[in-house]
Image: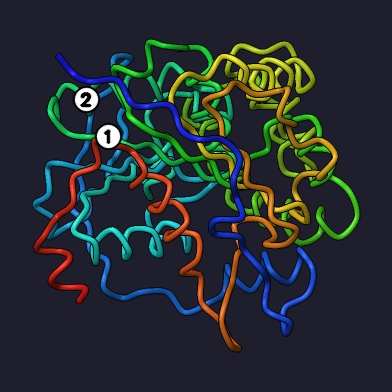
């Protein structure tokens, strides 16, 4: 019989508060700088392909060289992300140094190969998340399993935690969500205007559009290819493809039903939310307050950091704060098992 995780002491972000360096002001620069920083070259993966119940596939990248079966971290990446994203490499590099096992399940179509079906992935796809985590739990019955979600990966994870309520305690032991757009309508409105639209939305759509157009061609989808080509906002792409293909009426229906914010009051697994108040993807006043979440949720809202930025140190800086903040929270789990060999390597 597995022991349930102890509830955490809530809301004490001062233990490990993020502060942006003076040379890097503002959420935009903090976001962009992290994306372009030189990344670790010491992270290697072993890829595994899983056939899904609906005869599609997903690819999982397992941290190569780790033999620790006591602790396993599952990372759900962000929109159009992958195991080579800057946040993934920095976190996996820290896991490698600490002797902790890690795996990154790719959302459908994000591993470098377009998935087979007409559907792709979306911000509320908790059934896929549930299947992945249950299969990992079945394989690692005695391990402490921790889940981390970045951006929309965080939204999917938080929504799953709320839907599962106490049932999630038998699958994972702790969770962390970083830079999460917990209200998708708010996030879309932010990204579809001004500089955000020119900088971020255009970058996301640049990789999304070819995948969607390929699906239109190979599956004969009743989706207006011309509308996809000229789309320049998330509202347009979600109205034309994401919503109808994944069972939603339109973009508004998708955003409302897939958002994780209404589910946070039902979370039972000890969970940490890390969101910078100057995140250009999400307005600070829309972040959930203490009354919006359950007693199992710890809120850490630093004044700066951008969107999955959190750069520290002298110019050009590094992104080592976030992995350490995540592991600090996970190590508070009373069942966390320390790898003594890793301690010797780090000494």
Q: CA distance from mark 2 to mark 1?
A: 8 Å
At horizontal 28% and vertical 37% (from top left) the residue drawn is 334
Instruction: Find numbered disc 2 in the image and state the secondary structure of the residue it sits on.
Output: helix
Instruction: Find numbered disc 1 in the image and state the secondary structure of the residue it sits on.
Output: strand
User: Which one is nearer the viewer's eye here, 257 or 288?
Assistant: 288
Residue 169, by quadrant, is top left
On screen, residue 252 above or below 232 = above
User: Which one is nearer the viewer's eye here, 207 or 299?
Assistant: 299
On screen, residue 74 above or below 36 = above
- The disc placed on residue 145 is 1
Tell me where residue 151 appears, x and y as whole percent: 58, 43
Tell me where residue 184 appears, x and y as whole percent: 72, 31
Q: Which residue is mark 2?
A: 137
Asked if the residue under mark 1 is in contact with the one under mark 2, i.e. CB atoms within 8 Å, the reply is: yes
At horizontal 22% and vertical 37% (from top left) the residue drawn is 49
N-terminal-most mark, 2 or 1? 2
At horizontal 33% and vertical 14% (from top left) the residue drawn is 54
């Amino acid at each position: 019989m597995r022991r349930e995780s102890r509830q955490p002491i809530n809301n004490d972000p001062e233990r490990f508060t993020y502060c942006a360096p003076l040379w890097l002001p503002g959420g935009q620069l903090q976001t962009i700088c992290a994306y372009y920083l030189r990344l670790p070259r010491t992270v290697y993966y072993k890829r595994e392909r899983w056939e899904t119940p609906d005869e599609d596939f997903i690819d999982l990248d397992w941290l190569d060289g780790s033999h620790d079966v006591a602790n396993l971290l599952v990372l759900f990446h962000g929109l159009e992300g992958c195991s080579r994203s800057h946040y993934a490499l920095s976190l996996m590099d820290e896991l490698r140094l600490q002797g902790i096992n890690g795996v990154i399940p790719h959302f459908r179509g994000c591993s470098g190969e377009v998935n087979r079906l007409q559907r792709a992935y979306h911000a509320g796809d908790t059934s896929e998340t549930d299947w992945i985590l249950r299969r990992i739990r079945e394989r690692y019955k005695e391990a402490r399993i921790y889940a981390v979600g970045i951006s929309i990966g965080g939204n999917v994870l938080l929504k799953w935690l709320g839907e599962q309520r106490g049932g999630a305690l038998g699958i994972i032991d702790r969770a962390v969500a970083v830079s999460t757009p917990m209200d998708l309508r708010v996030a879309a409105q932010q990204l579809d205007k001004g500089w955000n639209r020119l900088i971020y939305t255009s970058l996301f759509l640049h990789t999304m559009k070819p995948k969607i157009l390929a699906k239109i061609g190979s599956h004969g989808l009743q989706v207006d290819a011309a509308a996809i080509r000229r789309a320049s906002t998330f509202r347009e792409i979600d109205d034309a493809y994401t919503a109808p293909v994944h069972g939603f009426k339109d973009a508004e229906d998708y955003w409302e039903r897939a958002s994780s914010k209404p589910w946070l009051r039902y979370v039972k697994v000890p969970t940490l939310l890390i969101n910078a108040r100057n995140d250009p993807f999400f307005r600070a006043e829309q972040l959930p307050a203490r009354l919006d979440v359950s007693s199992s949720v710890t809120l850490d809202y630093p004044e700066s950091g951008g969107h999955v930025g959190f750069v520290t140190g002298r110019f050009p800086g590094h992104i080592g704060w976030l992995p350490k903040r995540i592991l600090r929270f996970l190590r508070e789990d009373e069942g966390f098992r320390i790898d003594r060999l890793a301690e010797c390597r780090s000494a």
